[in-house]
C-alpha cells in the first residue's frame, strides 16, 4: 500500500503528459489535413514577433503553421494567435477541468441552473433510458404528446453527446416515440421561432450566435467575441460540420463583418451563397442584450472559466440559450474574429504555468 501511495503522483504526472501528447498529435494531424489557402502567409516581422510570443508561452515551441493558417484564411496576420495544440493540451485543462465541467455536459441539467436567459420550452427528457416530464417525473410518450397543441412539432436532441448537429431530429409530436428509439439520453423541446432578420439569411436552419466569455483569475468576466453561425438551404442546423457558415460580429456596433467562412476557412463568402444576402454591416438584432446577458450568466457558472454559448434570437429579439460548450473550438473564432485571447493572454499564461515543449515528448 505504501508503494502504491508513493507511485500514485508519478503515475498521475505521466498520465497528464500522455494526455497532452495525444491532444497535440491530434491537432497536428488536423493541421496537416487542411486544404491549401491562396492567401499570403506571414512576413518576417510577424514571424519574429510570433516566435517571441510562443517562446514566452511555452518554452521551446516554434511551430508557426497555425499562425500561417489563420493569416491565409482571414487576411489578418498576427503574432498572438493561439495554436490549437497549445489550446487543447494546456489551456483548456487549466480553464475547464473535466471533473468540474462534467455538470454542464448534460443539457437536461440546464433548467436547474438559475440566472440564464430563457431556454427553449422543454417537452420532456430521456435520462439513462427513462422518459421523464419537464419536472423530472416519470412519463410516457403519449402523455407528453397529449400536453402539446395540435400540429405541434418537437426537436429531439442528444443531451450528453453532441456535435455538428448530429442525431438531432425534428418530428411531428405524434412521431415522438419513434424518434426516441435507440436513444438513452435526450432533451425534447419545442422549436425556437427565430427573429425574421436572422431567418432571412437562411430560413431552413436555426441560425445562432456563438458568444465566447472568459473568467479572469480575479473573477472578472470578459467578452472574447461573438460570431453568427448560419445553415445552408435545406439544412435544419447551422453547424459548420454540417456545411454551415460563420461570420464575425463587431462587438461594439453589433453588425456582421464583411467576410464569412466555411468550416476550415478555405472558402470566403461576402454573402450567403443561397439567400444572396451580403454580410458586411448587417445588423444582428438583440446582439448587445445577448452579449451582456451571457457575461452575467457566466458569473453564475463557477465551475468553468471559458464558456461558448450557442444563442438563438427569438422573434421579439430576446436571447434563447441553446447550449453552453465547455470544450469549445478555437479555429472558428480565430478565423472569424482574429486572435481572441489577446486581451487575456497574460492571465492565460499564468494559468498554463512554465511549460516546455519537446518535439519527441510533447508538452512537459
Image (tube, grey):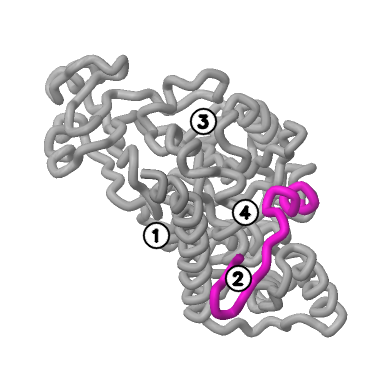
* Label 1 element class: helix
Q: Which residues are magenta?
A: 345-364
Residue 263 appears anywhere in the view: no
Q: Is residue 56 above or below residue 227?
A: below
Classify 10 Å Cα crowding around label 3: few (below 14), some (14-19), many (20 and above). many
The residue located at (61%, 43%) in the rendering is 306
* Residue ID for mark 2: 268
**Residue 304, percent from left and from top:** 57, 37
- The reply to whether dot 3 and dot 1 touch (C-beta < 8 Å) is no
- Disc nearer the start of the sequence (3/1): 1
* Label 4 element class: helix
Q: Quadrant of residue 36?
A: bottom right
- Disc nearer the start of the sequence (1/4): 4
Q: Nearer the viewer, residue 168 or 9?
A: 9
The residues tagged by marks 3 and 1 sit, at their Cα atoms, a distance apart of 22 Å
The residues tagged by marks 1 and 4 sit, at their Cα atoms, a distance apart of 27 Å
- Disc nearer the start of the sequence (4/2): 4
* Label 2 element class: strand
Quadrant containing the C terminus in the rendered view: bottom right
Q: Nearer the viewer, residue 153 or 47?
A: 47
* Label 3 element class: strand
Question: Horizontally, is 322 left or right of 197 in the view?
Answer: left
**Residue 231, percent from left and from top:** 45, 54
Q: Nearer the viewer, residue 342 or 355?
A: 355
**Residue 67, percent from left and from top:** 69, 73
The residues tagged by marks 2 and 3 sit, at their Cα atoms, a distance apart of 29 Å
Amino acid at each position: 500500500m505504501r508503494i502504491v501511495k508513493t507511485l500514485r503522483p508519478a503515475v498521475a504526472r505521466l498520465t497528464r503528459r500522455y494526455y497532452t501528447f495525444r491532444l497535440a498529435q491530434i491537432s497536428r494531424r488536423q493541421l496537416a489535413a487542411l486544404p491549401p489557402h491562396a492567401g499570403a502567409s506571414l512576413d518576417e516581422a510577424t514571424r519574429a514577433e510570433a516566435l517571441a510570443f510562443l517562446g514566452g508561452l511555452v518554452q521551446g515551441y516554434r511551430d508557426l503553421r497555425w499562425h500561417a493558417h489563420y493569416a491565409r484564411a482571414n487576411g489578418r496576420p498576427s503574432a498572438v494567435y493561439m495554436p490549437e495544440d497549445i489550446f487543447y493540451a494546456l489551456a483548456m485543462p487549466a480553464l475547464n477541468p473535466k471533473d468540474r465541467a462534467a455538470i454542464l455536459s448534460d443539457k437536461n441539467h440546464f433548467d436547474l441552473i438559475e440566472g440564464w436567459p430563457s431556454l427553449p420550452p422543454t417537452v420532456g427528457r430521456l435520462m439513462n433510458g427513462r422518459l421523464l416530464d419537464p419536472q423530472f417525473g416519470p412519463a410516457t410518450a403519449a402523455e407528453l404528446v397529449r400536453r402539446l397543441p395540435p400540429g405541434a412539432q418537437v426537436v429531439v436532441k442528444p443531451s450528453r453527446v453532441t456535435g455538428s448537429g448530429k442525431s438531432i431530429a425534428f418530428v411531428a409530436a405524434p412521431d415522438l416515440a419513434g424518434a426516441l428509439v435507440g436513444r438513452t439520453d435526450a432533451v425534447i423541446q419545442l422549436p425556437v421561432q427565430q427573429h425574421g432578420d436572422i431567418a432571412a439569411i437562411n430560413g431552413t436552419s436555426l441560425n445562432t450566435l456563438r458568444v465566447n466569455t472568459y473568467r479572469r483569475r480575479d473573477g472578472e468576466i470578459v467578452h472574447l467575441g461573438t460570431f453568427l453561425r448560419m445553415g445552408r438551404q435545406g439544412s435544419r442546423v447551422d453547424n459548420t460540420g454540417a456545411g454551415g457558415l460563420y461570420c464575425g460580429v463587431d462587438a461594439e456596433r453589433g453588425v456582421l463583418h464583411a467576410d464569412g467562412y466555411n468550416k476550415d476557412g478555405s472558402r470566403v463568402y461576402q454573402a450567403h451563397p443561397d439567400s444572396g444576402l451580403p454580410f458586411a454591416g448587417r445588423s444582428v438584432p438583440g446582439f448587445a442584450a445577448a452579449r451582456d446577458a451571457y457575461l452575467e450568466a457566466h458569473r453564475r457558472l463557477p465551475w468553468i472559466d471559458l464558456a461558448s454559448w450557442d444563442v438563438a434570437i427569438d422573434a421579439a429579439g430576446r436571447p434563447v440559450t441553446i447550449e453552453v460548450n465547455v470544450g469549445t473550438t478555437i479555429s472558428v473564432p480565430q478565423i472569424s474574429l482574429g486572435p481572441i485571447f489577446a486581451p487575456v493572454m497574460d492571465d492565460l499564461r499564468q494559468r498554463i504555468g512554465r511549460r516546455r515543449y519537446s518535439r519527441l515528448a510533447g508538452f512537459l
